[in-house]
Image: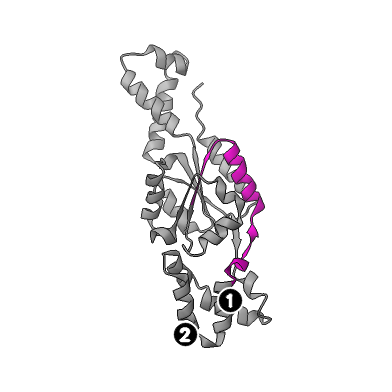
Amino acid sequence: MKSLNFRKQSRRFISSAKVQPLEFFGKITKNHYLCTLIFINLITMAIKNIIFDFGGVLVNWNPRYLLDNYLDNTEEMENLIQVICSPEWNHKLDLGYPFALAINELKDEFPKYKDIIQLSYDKWELMLGGDFPKTVDLLYQLKKDGYKIYGLTNWSKDTFPIAYNKFPFFKEFDGIVVSGEERLGKPDPAFYKLLLDRYNLIAEESIFIDDRAVNVEAAENLNIHGIFFDSQDTIEEKVYNIITENRLHLI
């Protein structure tokens, strides 16, 4: 990334001086403007913001938690999931399509399953199996350490308030952008830029965590530090490794 290359050049420029960095900045006047640019660039490279995806990272959402209570046949349940929770159908909801309308359309299309389909609306909360405790612990630790916490989620505008009210950790966020409210979603670059612009975030100062590789790649293309979430057991190490690598060492 261009800014990271400039950071390396800045460090080499400082290290070539015969004085300590802070003394260096204080004594040189001829190149004051250049030194100011270097100093500002180095500071802004430190990580300040952690951006979380929600489903699959913080929240353990799975339609099986609901359907398992009503269907004994595992094969039938898996087939039904492809009907009422297919990626295409979910993404339509994530982009703002009304949940109630989508449910009614499914019942008309699959009358055999109309009662179960209705349950997926009436008892949607049962699809929330809980949280990922180690990721939640990390969130609280990062907040305690002074980092700003943001959310960027593909989620229906109709069901996100249910999850928000269920999990107390959502109150810790400094800002949340929900795809269903914006009619934009990951991995569309405009969705990431919306978060950055709304909260005045600098991409290079931010880490983004998501359980889908395509979403992480989209963030990295915007110079956001990306982490692919594949286990709550390793996420803390991954986050703090990036923080350490980007920490400012002037002295």
| Location of residue 162 in the rendering, given as x and y in whole percent from the top left corner | 55, 61
Q: How many marks?
A: 2
Q: Residues within 10 Å of mark 1 (few under 14, many from 20)?
A: some
Tell which of 198 and 226 is nearer to you: 198
Closest to the observer, 158 or 87? 158
The residues colored magenta run 123-151
The CA distance from mark 1 to mark 2 is 15 Å
Report the residue marked by disc 1.
119
Q: Which secondary structure lies at badge 2? A: helix
Q: Earlier in the sequence, mark 1 or mark 2?
A: 2
Farthest residue toward the top? 27
- The amino acid type of the residue labelled 1 equals Leu
Q: Is residue 17 above or below residue 67?
A: above
Left or right of 168? Residue 97 is left
Q: Is residue 136 magenta?
A: yes
Q: Amino acid at mark 2?
A: Asp
Q: Answer with the quarter of the image where residue 167 lies.
A: bottom right
Residue 156: x %, y % from top left: 47, 64
What residue did someone put label 2 on? Answer: 108
- For residue 234, say whether it is visible: no
Residue at the spot 41% in from the left edge and 49% down from the top edge: 195
Which residue lies at the image location 62% right of the left edge and 68% below the top edge? 126
